[in-house]
Amino acid sequence: MKIFLMYLFLFIVGCFIGWVIEVLYRRIFAAKKWVNPGFMKGPWLPLYGFGVVLMFSMCLIIVGLFPDSIKFYNPIGGLFKREYVSGPTWADLIPIGLMWISMVLLEFLAGLIFIKGFHIKLWDYSNMKGNILGIICPVFNLIWLGVALIFYYGINPFLYLLSNNVYTFMFGDNGLVANVGFIFILGVFYGIMIYDFVVSVGLFSAISKFAKTTGIVEKYEIVKDKWENLKKEEKKLFFNKKKNELKNENQNLNMIKEKISQIIYIDPEKKEKTSSNYDEHGRPIKMDEDDKK
């Protein structure tokens, strides 16, 4: 359970960092505007969360499989419980290579699931040379290699220290006393994320259904814009229809009121004629022969 909570923390950190990276990438290079990436509304991308957990776990497992005589990059000592200090070595190629391949496969599998299952592309490399189904391409494969290098040499040592410090903060030095407040806050974040996921899945399913009706696979952001415009038009038509219905109801209500008035109230002309049969004191006036007729 303690390791599970630790991985939950790493996952949500990866989700947020990935969201920031994607937002900046779209703003500076791709869309040239502020775009909320992914299909969730909040500041998190689960794909990057899985990526961080995957790369961190791979480093932990691979380094643990080799004896201490095989030295890995360990700039400050104590990394993965290895006390020696070491710069880059040839052995680093093993975790870096496996992280690189794993991230490419993760991107491909995630993209394939969305394309085959939902007819939606969360990203599209169709205009890049050597792409496969628009999901992966050589250029971005090299970018993932760069990510693996940056993670291994620049992030992993500090992420390991952060994970140890957070673990100690959550459970104390002896691992017996849990920091309920921190765990509660972590749970609140996940509660919000899960709620966001459930709501976003409903919207995503509707957008996916809309995309499937076209018979083609479209980019999610384009379909999302089409869907939002369609919903705006439907809402406009709905309110116009309701407005017309209300207008018709008011007209019908006025007609009913008029009919009721005719039944209940005396017609003014009839009232004037009837009132002439009484004098100013309310006593009947004797009718002459013409009135009788």
Image (cartoon, grey):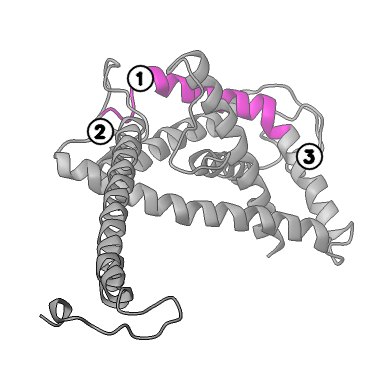
Residue in the foreground of this view, choosing between 30 and 132: 30
Is 152 contained in the magenta span? yes
The percent coordinates of residue 122 (x first, y second) are 37, 35
Residue at disc 2, secondary structure: strand
Q: Which mark is residue 218?
A: 2
> Measured from the top left, where is residue 159 in percent x and y?
71, 37
Q: Determine whether the residue tagged by mark 1 lies in a helix, strand or loop.
A: helix
Region of the chain picked out in magenta, as a range: 134-157
- 58 relative position to 73: left or right: left
Residue located at (72% from left, 61% from top): 2
Report the amino acid beneath label 1.
Pro
Residue drawn 78% across and 39% down?
A: 161
The residue that disc 1 covers is 138
Kindly identify which residue carries mark 3: 161
Does residue 265 appear in this view?
A: no
Residue 243 placement, left or right of 98: left
Badge 3: few (under 14), some or many (20 or more) residues near its Cα, within 10 Å? some
Of mark 3 and mark 2, the one earlier in the sequence is: 3
Q: Quadrant of the C terminus?
A: bottom left
| Marks 3 and 1, how far apart at CA | 33 Å
Mark 2 neighbour density, 10 Å: few (under 14) some (14–19) many (20 or more): many
Identity of the amino acid at label 3?
Leu
Q: Are marks 3 and 2 in contact (CB under 8 Å)?
A: no
Q: Quadrant of the N terminus?
A: bottom right
Which is nearer the N-term, disc 3 or disc 1?
Answer: 1
Q: Label 3: state its secondary structure.
A: helix
Q: What predominant SS class does the magenta segment belong to?
A: helix
Query: Is residue 290 inside the magenta stretch?
Result: no
